[in-house]
Image (tube, helix red, strand yellow):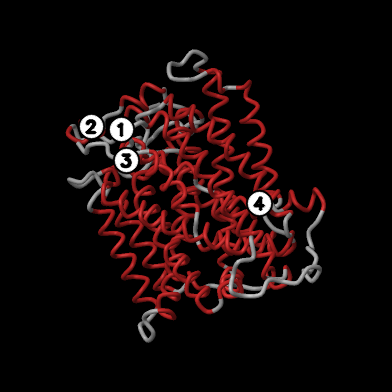
Amino acid sequence: MNSKKMGLGSAVSVCVGLIVATSCLLSLGLGTGLAGKGFIVAMLIVVVLNILLALSFRELHSLMPEAEGGLGQYTLAGLGPVPSIISNLSAYVITNMLAGSVELAMCGLVIQETFLKGVPVLVISLSLLAFLTVVNYLGVDIFAKIQNITVIALIGSLILLGIISTFKLGVGAPLAPGTQTPPVVTGVSGILSLTALAFWMFIGIEFVIPVSKDLKNPKRDVPLAMILGVCLLFIVQSLLSTGMRNYVSLEELRSSSMPHIIFAERVMGKAGSYWMGLITILAGISTINTVLGSVTRILSGMADAGLMPAYLSKKNKSGTPTPGLFLMTGVISFILVSGIANYSGLTNFLLAASCFWLTSYILVNLTVLVLRRRYPNAPGRDKRFTLWGIPQIICIIGDVYMIWHIAEGDARIFIYKIYFVLLIITLLFAFFWVKVIKKADAFRPVSLDEINDVKLESQEEEGQTCPSLMVN
């Protein structure tokens, strides 16, 4: 058994590491270009929703401290196996395979243009993926070290750039007073419509849960890492948004495909573009490292619960679920080789995937309310934070609102088409796996005792695959 060596700092780095990505910098530039300083209000609304969401995860983690599967095992206890499979596959696997591919492709491009001219982007991206796969294969201790170094360098760079640009200390000339172009999105309804865009910049705070068993004080650090993570990111992104408005016109920000690169060059000259290129590389490494380290454990937790094939739960001597790791690496490699990561409409696919993530958050909050009714006196629940279910109700309303306002016009219709196609495929798989393969009840929840007491190793020795969680 691995000794627990990860502290609160490592837990925060897991949260921040996944959230801070190049796609977040793009979203920040676009949102600022559309609404100006109003986009900070949209971000603040999303931060409040995430803090309320952290209360739900705090309660679920306290009730099911042995659950590694995150959303999937939580919804399994509250809503049954089919919602559990939908929650995990849609929110984690689909979204992060696509997002991870984009991050690696952008890292490859930046590294080629900055350091390795002449080397194919695909070779660079695949080499970086292979390196991070080896890092995660060797175990969580190395994962934590790489993650901490990367996140500290990344956040430090963003804070420094934010301070320089906010206080107009850059080598470039800031915009003259009164010359900034007006925002195109204004008013309360307009700002609220941008919460869906801002949501992507804070998505995935619960990724600390799969590594909770490797924390020194998981009961304290899991919820605290979520809250500190989103608050830290809000401060950093607010500084950057203010700095962008000081040096780049809103029109340029909303019309550019690389607003963060333009911003950095305006603030620091050519050195700024190199600096932001380095930040892009760090963001990609941080994201992929977190995806490989956490999603593989989520798949392992699903396998432990009988919601995925049993081989996904097998671990090497370092405790790494190697089948899930190789699955993630293989699919991301396929996407990179196929060229889909460079497709101009990939942002719409990511937004469609974010609809799934929001759907999973709705299921999580429903699970909290259901479990309170089913287990009113369950040990582990801190009733001081239940607050009559108000945080969960607010989260559900906010998530539905963001799905409805995920985009506008033709883009919205296209995203909904992708969303419903993927939803149908996921539903078909979930029902096939539960009803045909496992011959179980599609919506029969399992007890908290079954979630907490299941021991994969003993079941494997008996040739079983978690039947106690999937019986009629």
Q: Residue 404, image x and y in percent?
A: 70, 49
Residue pointed to by mark 2:
459
User: Which amino acid, mark 3?
Assistant: Met
Name the residue located 43 percent from the left edge and 63 percent from the top edge.
Answer: 284
Q: Residues within 10 Å of mark 3 (few under 14, many from 20)?
A: many
User: Which amino acid, mark 4?
Assistant: Ala
User: Which amino acid, mark 2?
Assistant: Gln
Name the residue located 44 percent from the left edge and 69 percent from the top edge.
Answer: 278
Residue pointed to by mark 3:
6
Circles 2, 1 touching at the beta carbon (< 8 Å) = yes
Circles 4, 3 touching at the beta carbon (< 8 Å) = no
Pick the quarter of the image with the N terminus: top left
Q: Earlier in the sequence, mark 1 or mark 3?
A: 3
Q: Is residue 340 visible?
A: no
Among the 4 quarters of the image, the one containing residue 432: top left
Q: What element carries label 4?
A: helix
Q: What element carries label 2?
A: helix
Pick the quarter of the image with the C terminus: top left
Horizontally, is 185 left or right of 450 in the view?
A: right
Front residue of this view, candidates 161 and 124: 161
446 over 294 or under it: above or below: above
Circles 1, 3 touching at the beta carbon (< 8 Å) = no
Circles 4, 1 touching at the beta carbon (< 8 Å) = no
Choose mark 4 or mark 2, whichever is in front.
4
Residue pointed to by mark 4:
196
Q: Earlier in the sequence, mark 2 or mark 1?
A: 2
Q: Residues within 10 Å of mark 2 (few under 14, many from 20)?
A: some
Front residue of this view, candidates 151 and 109: 151
Horizontally, is 336 left or right of 185 in the view?
A: left
Which mark, by number, is residue 466? 1
Choose mark 2 or mark 3, whichever is in front.
3
Q: Residue 210, image x and y in percent?
A: 37, 40
